[in-house]
Image (tube, grey):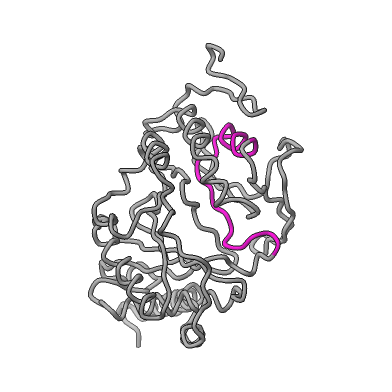
């Protein structure tokens, strides 16, 4: 190792390891590299064969999401070219399938790892459903724990099971492994139905309202992680003070932890004690037809929110036009 904070590891030249990872991180680039190397087997199992987007933090710059690999990407990093409807272009995504690629990403100051829900052999067959539990601004993690319990109960009522992890931010993710019979549209519908059923169990606590101002201080159960969406991988660090990690937790322990318990300084040691998913992540499950059918009757939240936003904007313009601030 050189005094300048550089070394070679796993066939990757690592540089500037002793620099702060980002302002307020409380961690260096070396801490990121060491953490990802320590949990390589675990996080690679989450990333393998899934087109990857990462959030990088370069010195002096704001964090940014990178989908298209840069031109200087080494030839040994596997990539796949996919059409991106949002940007109307082909995008070359990396596949992070081995330790060398993971270390290369770490050296590029890629802090967050967001894989697709489906694998490259069939992107439109997700391997799991994801319910994103998002407590209100300033809301305690305990609220997310209670809402995650509603999702767990809704799943049980449908004959399904899920596992839970901290999001690495302020909430939690409930993952429901599904079998290969489930296509993207049915998976999305089932996710909407589970969220709606969870909300009905305790409407004073939980909401599926996509528009923030409509949530009334409740926990948002987000059902939009579907189709071509990504989700932050288990064991991925997050670009937040202290560099917390999205970490699997046993249901029995969920009300005894806080997101800040799992960071690049602590999570590798915790994962070394036992595989956090062991005994928690169920096998692939077939979705009940009734659940899927119910979900297809529920509007897609993002689309509904877009139309509602336009309606409210028109209403505001009308109100401003008559000078009363009210809709005539």
- Is 105 left or right of 263, judged from the image as shown? right
Q: Is residue 194 magenta?
A: no
Quarter the C terminus occupies? bottom left
**x and y percentages locating residue 113 in the rendered image:** 53, 47
Residue nearest the observer in this picture, 147 or 108: 147
Relative to 133, is 183 above or below? below
Q: Is residue 103 magenta?
A: yes
Image quadrant in which you'd find residue 7: top right
**x and y percentages locating residue 86 in the rendered image:** 64, 63
Q: Give me the residue at 72% from left, 45% from top.
A: 78
Q: Which residues are magenta?
A: 100-121
- Is 137 left or right of 41, judged from the image as shown? left
Residue nearest the observer in this picture, 19 or 113: 113
Quarter the N terminus occupies? top right
- Is 82 left or right of 239, judged from the image as shown? right
Residue nearest the observer in this picture, 157 or 200: 157
Q: Give me the residue at 64% from left, 24% from top.
A: 13
Q: Residue furthest top?
A: 3
Relative to 249, is 319 above or below? below
Image quadrant in which you'd find residue 91: bottom right
């Amino acid at each position: 190792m050189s005094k300048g904070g550089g070394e070679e590891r796993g066939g990757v030249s690592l540089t500037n390891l002793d620099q702060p990872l980002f302002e307020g991180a409380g961690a260096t680039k070396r801490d990121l590299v060491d953490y990802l190397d320590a949990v390589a087997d675990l996080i690679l199992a989450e990333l393998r064969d899934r087109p990857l987007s990462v959030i990088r933090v370069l010195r002096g710059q704001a964090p940014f999401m990178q989908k298209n690999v840069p031109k200087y990407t080494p030839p040994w990093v596997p990539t796949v070219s996919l059409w991106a409807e949002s940007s109307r272009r082909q995008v070359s995504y990396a596949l992070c399938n081995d330790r060398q690629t993971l270390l290369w990403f770490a050296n590029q100051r890629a802090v967050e790892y967001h894989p697709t829900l489906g694998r490259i052999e069939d992107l439109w067959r997700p391997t799991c459903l994801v319910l994103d539990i998002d407590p209100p601004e300033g809301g305690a993690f305990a609220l997310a724990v209670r809402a995650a319990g509603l999702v767990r109960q809704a799943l049980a009522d449908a004959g399904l099971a899920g596992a839970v992890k901290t999001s690495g931010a302020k909430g939690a993710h409930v993952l429901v492994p599904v079998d290969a019979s489930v296509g993207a549209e049915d998976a999305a519908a089932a996710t909407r139905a589970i969220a709606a059923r969870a909300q009905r169990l305790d409407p004073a606590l939980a909401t599926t309202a996509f528009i923030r101002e409509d949530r009334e201080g409740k926990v948002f159960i987000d059902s939009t992680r579907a189709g071509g969406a990504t989700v932050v991988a288990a064991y991925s660090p997050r670009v937040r003070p202290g560099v917390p990690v999205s970490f699997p937790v046993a249901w029995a322990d969920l009300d005894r932890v806080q997101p800040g318990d799992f960071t690049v300084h602590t999570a590798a040691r915790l994962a070394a004690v036992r595989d956090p998913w062991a005994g928690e992540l169920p096998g692939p499950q077939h979705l009940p037809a009734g659940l899927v059918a119910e979900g297809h009757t529920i509007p897609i939240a993002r689309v509904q929110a877009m139309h509602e936003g336009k309606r409210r904007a028109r209403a505001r313009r009308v109100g401003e036009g008559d000078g009363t601030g009210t809709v005539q």
